Amino acid sequence: MGEAFFTSTEASKITGCSRRQLQYWRRQGVVVPTVNPGGKGRNVYYSESDLLILAVMEYLLSIGLNFDTSLTALNILMTKNLFLSAKSWTKDQTRLMFFLSLDNEEVRLENFNVELAKQKLEEGYPVIPFCCDRIYDKLQSNLKYFHQGQSDISCRENN
Amino acid sequence: MGEAFFTSTEASKITGCSRRQLQYWRRQGVVVPTVNPGGKGRNVYYSESDLLILAVMEYLLSIGLNFDTSLTALNILMTKNLFLSAKSWTKDQTRLMFFLSLDNEEVRLENFNVELAKQKLEEGYPVIPFCCDRIYDKLQSNLKYFHQGQSDISCRENN
């Protein structure tokens, strides 16, 4: 089976991002679909890796972070190539934490370490745990649910 | 000396909030100036307690939280009357922490407790330390600086 690609509507259903968000992020260059990246609504297709990036962005926004901070955190994760190697993550790579600075200027990523987290909290810094595997597993579960829905539809069409 | 009141421009300089934010928050009923709360730009005056609320809102936004989450956190603090009693805070009241939920639906406030924080981080919840006294002290320092500036201007005007 070749790699699957998803329309904006499908990507929105699978990741929980709204179509408006997808459109805005395309324009801003935040998450660009692999197929026809410069295209509009109906002509673009997201790969499974794109969906993972969307799912991470959706997660960061859903916990209450603003757009700029979520984007900074996403870019740090992208720089570390964490998304490309989802299937070969080691335990250290899946449990991470972000420290937010107190002036919105810096976001730091570290491996999850409860002693360092404690120290940072004592100093007044917000600590955001980030579990790559949870987001990956949730996406896989949504994808499975989506494909089941697709095959249900195709079965109905065949009857 | 009677209670001091501050124009929007002064409140903006002292708290670091932009005038646009003040205007938006007035319209939304988030932080309403004590004098002429329904008025526009030049006719409204903020009390020192209003400034503290502005400073808290500015702080919550500055660490990277979005507007809705910051507002929820602010409202929780307001419900607990923490702002009215700034001068009589006990140590327990000044060191707090927020837990953010993973679906943007709940924000919880607790006294700062490192063991509880550790447990929540292990479970994947973001933890935001909140030190009332730091925000209060920073505001007092900004107010002092502002009043000094004012008296410098008044000295110059008298010369």
Image: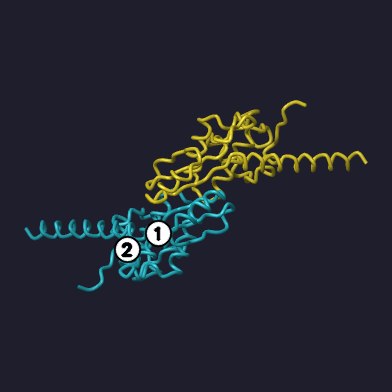
Chain colours: A yellow, B cyan
> Which percent across, then down, holds residue B113?
44, 58
Of the two numbered discs 1 and 2 on the same chain, state the one appearing first in sequence.
Answer: 1
Is the residue at mark 1 from the same chain as the one at mark 2?
A: yes
Q: Chain of mark 1?
A: B
Mark 2 packing: few (<14 Cα in 10 Å), some, or many (20+)? few
Quadrant where the C terminus of chain B is found in the figure: bottom left
Q: Is residue B158 above or below residue A5?
A: below
Mark 1 packing: few (<14 Cα in 10 Å), some, or many (20+)? some
What SS does tag 1 mark? Answer: helix
Q: Chain of mark 2?
A: B
- How many badges with numbers are in the image? 2
Q: Nearer the viewer, mark 1 or mark 2?
A: 1
What SS does tag 2 mark? Answer: helix
Q: Is residue A44 visible?
A: no
| Foreground pick, B84 / A129 | A129
Of all residues, the one furthest to the left in this rendering is: B159
| Foreground pick, A6 / B104 | B104
> Which percent across, then down, holds residue A36?
64, 28
> Which percent across, then down, holds residue A143?
72, 40
Residue at coordinates 42% horizontally, 54% vertically from top-left? B129
Q: Quadrant of residue A30?
A: top right
Question: Gap between marks 1 and 2, in whole Å?
Answer: 11 Å
Task: Report the amino acid beneath label 1.
Answer: Gln
Is residue B11 rendered to the left or right of residue A90?
Answer: left
| Foreground pick, A129 / B25 | A129
Look at mark 2 in the image and give the residue it sits on: B42
Look at mark 1 in the image and give the residue it sits on: B23
Task: Report the amino acid beneath label 2.
Answer: Arg
> Which percent across, then down, holds residue A153?
84, 42
